[in-house]
Image: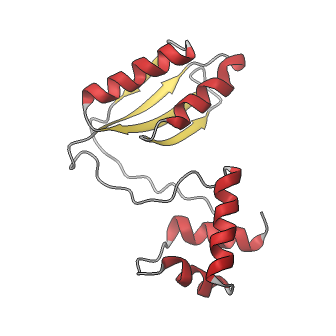
Amino acid sequence: MDDLDKRILNILQTEFPITAEPFAEIARQVGISEHETFERVGRMKESGVIRRIGAIFESRKLGFASALCAARVPEASLPVFVKTVNAYIGVTHNYRRNHPYNVWFTCIAPTEEALRAFLDDLREKTRVRDILCMQAVRKFKVNAQFDV
């Protein structure tokens, strides 16, 4: 990633333009063409720097179930576990921590039953049984943006 990619990432995560042509606006802000902006974003998505670009909705108000989950994953099982978690469309964050529960992720599902089914499926596919599911009792909004 060069400085231009970093500028684009900062705009994507903090000031995404709500316009008919948001990438044209991002291109204008960083001084390149819309085409080059698309190419750069595409490369960052292909390389895994960008996982997804999308809106964040109040899932609970839409009737969805969501949870913060923590898993105790053996080192040798990490690649398969992470790949399996990331394949689930409802996972919004997935990160490693220096903690006995070393992989933490958040997920959203259409129902409580679907959330439980996802976690059961994850346990079955990865053979990782020690997964905690912590649903919010009270919500706190933390601004998770990273200045790149």
Q: Identify the residue shown where x is 65% and y is 75%.
A: 37
Q: Is residue 130 left or right of residue 20?
A: right
Q: How many marks?
A: 0
Q: In the figure, 73 relative to 46: above or below?
A: above
Q: How is the image coloured?
A: secondary structure
Picture quadrant where residue 57 is located: bottom left
Picture quadrant where residue 77 is located: top right
Front one among 114 and 3: 114
**Where the N terminus falls, by quadrant?**
bottom right
Q: Position of residue 50 (x, y in %)?
A: 61, 55
Q: Identify the residue shown where x is 56% and y is 22%.
A: 101
Q: Is residue 56 left or right of residue 102?
A: left
Q: Is residue 130 visible?
A: no
Picture quadrant where residue 89 is located: top left
Q: Identify the residue shown where x is 53% and y is 54%.
A: 52
Front one among 3 and 83: 83
Q: Position of residue 70 (x, y in %)?
A: 49, 26
Q: In the figure, 57 relative to 104: above or below?
A: below
Q: In the figure, 99 relative to 147: above or below?
A: above
Q: Identify the residue shown where x is 30% and y is 45%.
A: 139
Q: Position of residue 132 (x, y in %)?
A: 43, 21
Q: Is residue 90 left or right of residue 78?
A: left
Q: Position of residue 79 (x, y in %)?
A: 68, 27
